[in-house]
Amino acid sequence: MKQFISHKENKDFKRLYYRGKSFVDPCFVMYVAKGRARQTRLGVTVGKKVGCAVYRNRAKRLLRAAFSTVSENIVSGYDFVFVARTRILTKKSYTIANSIEKHLKAAGVWRDIPSIEQDADMVDKALSERHLSQKNI
C-alpha cells in the first residue's frame, strides 16, 4: 500500500476545485490535478447534507480505504480531492474502489502493474519458448 499525504489547507482544495479536472460518480466527485510535490496527496470533504457526524466520518473512511487500495497503481505527483455524495453510505469500499479505478483510468493517472500471477505466467511462457527453441537446434 502506497502512502499519500492529506490536503489540510483551504487553498489546496480551492486550487483543485478551480484548476483540476473533475470526474462525477453517483457516490462522489473526484478532482485531479498535477501536484507541486512528487508525492500523491489526497483530500476528502463531506458536506452536512450527507448526514450527522457519524455518517460523514463513515463516508470519509470509505473513500480513504478505497483510495488506499488503488493507490499503488497511481502515477506519483498528482493531487486528488474527493467530495462525498449521499449515496456513498449504501456502498461497500470495494465498489467505491472499482469506481475510483475507472475514473483514474479516464483521468490518465492509472498505470498497470502486473500481478504476481501475470509475472509467473510470463516466466512460464518464456521458459517454454526457450525450451522449444533448444529442442529445434
Image (cartoon, rainbow, N blue to C red):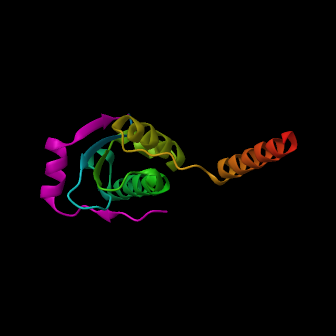
Q: Nearer the viewer, residue 137 or 27?
A: 137
Q: Nearer the viewer, residue 69 or 84?
A: 69
Instruction: Residue 130 in the image: state x and y as whole percent.
Output: 77, 47
> Disc count in the image?
0
Q: Is residue 123 magenta?
A: no
Q: Nearer the viewer, residue 24 or 78?
A: 78
Q: Is residue 45 visible?
A: no
Image quadrant assignment for residue 3: bottom left
> Which residue is at 77% across, 49% downward?
127
Image quadrant assignment for residue 35: bottom left
| Magenta part of the chain | 1-25
Q: Is residue 79 left or right of residue 90?
A: left
> Which residue is at 61% across, 51% downward?
115
Q: Is residue 39 above or below residue 45?
A: below
Q: Is residue 13 magenta?
A: yes
Instruction: Residue 103 in the image: state x and y as whole percent.
Output: 39, 38
Q: Nearer the viewer, residue 10 or 124?
A: 124
Q: Is residue 28 visible?
A: yes
> Which residue is at 33% across, 41% downward?
85
Q: Is residue 9 left or right of residue 75?
A: left
Q: Please, which residue is most extreme toward the front here?
A: 137
The quarter of the image holding the C terminus is: top right
Q: Please, which residue is most extreme toward the right here?
A: 135
> Which residue is at 31% across, 65% downward?
5
Instruction: Residue 106 in the image: state x and y as whole percent.
Output: 38, 34
